[in-house]
Amino acid sequence: MIIDIHAHCCDLRTPGSMDRVPLTMDALLARLNDEGIDRAVMLPWPACPEAVTFPGLFGDMPDVVSQIRASAAHPDRLIPFGNLDVRWGGNSASADFRWLLERYVDLGCRGIGELGGNLPFDDPRVVNVVRQCGELDLPVLFESCGPGEGKYGLIDEPGSPRLERLLQLAPNTTIIGHGPGFWAEIGPLLGPEAKSGYPTGPIGDGGSLQRLLRTYPGLFADISAYSGFNALTRDPQRGLAFIKEFSDRLLFGTDTCFADAEGRMPQLGFLKDLALAGGITDEEYAAIVGGNAERVLAFKA
């Protein structure tokens, strides 16, 4: 079974990109059929003010709950996640999110994400929500694209000290990493700018990402978007070694943001080519494209 861990069904256009084709439910299902993907995790977006780009507010599914309900109408193809802003509930580090999380579970949600608030990983409000998700066995998928104006997602310094602290403070929660700020750490960083971008070139002996994956069994890696693809392919030999070492922790995803051809992602074809060439075994391929997601989501076909 092939499971896309990172799919959307919403209007992600900005006023300056109205020529792009938004992601309707029909467009999402058509893409899955076209790419041969059996099921997809549908991540509602946006849930935080940093990610609101205006056109989506006027669409058919402008909010998290409407997107969850729409995906729940296709239980054979879509696996809904809930989403939230950790500043909800009074913007307090002691806010009780259990009522909301339980309602999401009642709607069929298998996890939470992608968290997009532009706050440090170890902010007490982030830790509070991630711990409560763990109590309900809900994995948490986060975005990390750097700090500052126009950015969204959880924030860290080079070396991932804040992500590591979150992993230590919420050891009972499965955490799924995603985004430039996560994947840049596959290699050594020269400074904060590289962490928020798409570094190129050799990854050498690796960066903090390898160390964290080896140390914390509850951390998984979503290979979607250009950030994931760039990380796995910028140094082909070392990238292949990374894939093989962590084949039990990698989750195939696309993060396709628009319904036009320009928005398609190459990850699945890349993995199929690796398997056909003998770079990865059939078992490693099966784990990455679906088996690991089944474990994380406690889902059986």
Image (tube, rainbow, N blue to C red):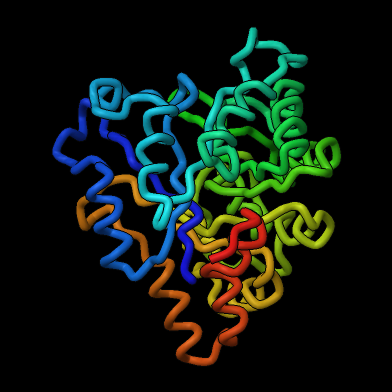
* Residue ID at (38%, 23%): 52
Q: Is residue 211 left or right of residue 277?
A: right
Residue 112: give x, y in percent of width and height. Answer: 58, 38
Viewer can see residue 144? no
Q: Front-most of 102 and 192? A: 102
* Residue ID at (67%, 64%): 249
Extreme residue in the left direction? 19
Decide: is 287 above or below 192. below
Decide: is 278 above or below 137. below
Residue 258: give x, y in percent of width and height. Answer: 27, 46
Which image quadrant for residue 53?
A: top left
Residue 263: give x, y in percent of width and height. Answer: 28, 53
Extreme residue in the top direction? 90
Q: Front-most of 92 and 106? A: 106
* Residue ID at (66%, 45%): 139
Q: Is residue 267 left or right of residue 287?
A: left
Count every numbered label the image shows and give the total.
Answer: 0
Residue 137: give x, y in percent of width and height. Answer: 72, 43
* Residue ID at (46%, 59%): 4
Which image quadrant for residue 100?
A: top right
Q: Is residue 238 left or right of residue 233?
A: right
Decide: is 226 above or below 247. above
Viewer can see residue 215? yes
